[in-house]
């Protein structure tokens, strides 16, 4: 017996929606993978440039910020984002502090170790800020926090295989600065415009620091190219791709997938810098990444209707609601 027209039409619509959902999921997965590789590449490129002395940390950072600002300005112009500036000098200062501390830390830290300390410091900063704002972690979150803290303490504790204290401290400062920068950016309704404006505001800060260090600056063609790649490709374009990926990610998934960045960075250090994976790093990684994962997953249980923001997109009940374009 032939099916009524209404039923066939409904099945066709359902099939189209399923196909569209599958395509959207595939795009989100691809964008997320590209972003994670880009973020991990920041560590690899920085370490690759500084480990061999092809450029000094100040010059590398200044070029990274300058090229990132130029790339984001071009992207914003192409997207015709003409809204009023949404950045601030405080956020720009945090961005500059992160970038300079990040570079100076990688003078002595291995790629994977630096990425792990950075990620741990960022997440710790944001979690502590949440507690100060009135959030009350559930028991599994406290377990995760203590596990991550223990892993970090074990990683940076003195010993033959322990990382340099100065480098570890600088990377922790970089993580704190990026955590503050991220927290301040939550209220932005247009993350690309805000990021562009903050990068542009960070340029004079970077140039001022460069002038102070002018007599000690050194560079080579390879070092300059690595800095420009870090600023324009893995930072500037990387952030834009990340904001696009966030439209298809829940708040919890957005936080959890970033746990892959230190792992990818460590692999990059092995492949491109011939760095060794020591037992201390492996054990600490399992503790830190597992602890942060527990903390984030536990925080994913929000009350219905409770809202938050991820990457400038409003999130209701853990589901990201993409902001409409201008």
Image (spheres, rainbow, N blue to C red):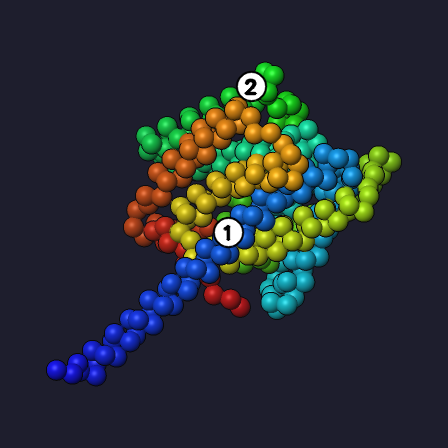
Position of 50 relative to 244 (above/below):
above
Residue 292 found in image quarter: top left
Question: How many C-alpha atoms fall within 10 Å of the one at disc 1: few (<14), some, or many (≥20)?
Answer: some
* Rendering coords of residue 42 (x, y %): 63, 44
Left-right relation of 281 to 145: right
Q: Is residue 87 visible?
A: no
Which residue is denoted by mark 2 in the rendering? Answer: 157
* Tags 2 and 1 touching, CB below 8 Å: no
Which residue is denoted by mark 1 in the rendering? Answer: 33
- Residue pictured at 40% horizontal, 46% vertical: 252
- Residue pictured at 45% horizontal, 30% vertical: 286
Pick the residue in front: 22 or 125. Answer: 22
Q: Is residue 236 visible?
A: yes
Question: How many C-alpha atoms fall within 10 Å of the one at disc 2: few (<14), some, or many (≥20)?
Answer: some
* Rendering coords of residue 124 (x, y %): 49, 33
* Rendering coords of residue 264 (x, y %): 54, 41
Pick the residue in front: 220 or 84. Answer: 220
Left-right relation of 211 to 36: right
Q: Kindly state the secondary structure of the residue where label 2 is placed.
A: loop
Position of 2 relative to 319 (above/below):
below
- Residue pictured at 54% horizontal, 38% vertical: 262
Position of 92 relative to 320 (above/below):
above
Earlier along the polypeptide chain: callout 2 or callout 1? 1
* Rendering coords of residue 274 (x, y %): 64, 34
């Amino acid at each position: 017996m032939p099916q009524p027209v209404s039923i066939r039409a409904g099945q066709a619509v359902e099939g189209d929606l399923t196909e569209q959902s599958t395509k959207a999921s595939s795009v989100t997965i691809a964008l997320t993978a590209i972003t994670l590789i880009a973020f991990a590449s920041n560590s690899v490129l920085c370490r690759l440039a500084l480990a061999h002395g092809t450029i000094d940390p100040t010059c590398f950072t200044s070029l990274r910020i300058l090229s990132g600002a130029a790339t984001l300005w071009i992207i914003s112009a192409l997207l015709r984002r003409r809204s009023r500036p949404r950045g601030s000098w405080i956020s720009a200062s945090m961005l500059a502090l992160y970038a300079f501390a990040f570079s100076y830390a990688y003078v002595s830290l291995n790629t994977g170790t630096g990425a792990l300390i950075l990620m741990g410091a960022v997440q710790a900063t944001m979690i502590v800020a949440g507690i100060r704002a009135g959030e009350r972690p559930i028991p599994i979150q406290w377990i995760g926090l203590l596990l991550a803290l223990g892993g970090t303490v074990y990683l940076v504790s003195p010993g033959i295989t322990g990382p340099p204290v100065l480098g570890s401290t600088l990377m922790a400062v970089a993580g704190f600065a990026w955590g503050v920068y991220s927290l301040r950016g939550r209220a932005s309704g247009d993350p690309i415009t805000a990021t562009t404006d903050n990068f542009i505001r960070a340029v004079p800060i970077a140039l001022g620091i460069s002038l102070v260090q002018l007599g000690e600056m050194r560079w080579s063609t390879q070092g300059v190219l690595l800095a420009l790649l870090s600023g324009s490709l893995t930072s500037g374009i990387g952030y834009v791709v990340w904001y696009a990926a966030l439209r298809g990610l829940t708040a919890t998934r957005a936080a959890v997938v970033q746990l892959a960045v230190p792992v990818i960075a460590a692999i990059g250090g092995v492949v491109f810098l011939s760095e060794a994976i020591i037992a201390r790093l492996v054990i600490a990684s399992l503790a830190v990444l597992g602890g942060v994962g527990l903390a984030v997953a536990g925080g994913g249980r929000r009350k219905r209707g409770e809202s938050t923001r991820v990457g400038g997109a409003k999130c209701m009940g853990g589901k990201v609601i993409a902001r409409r374009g201008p």
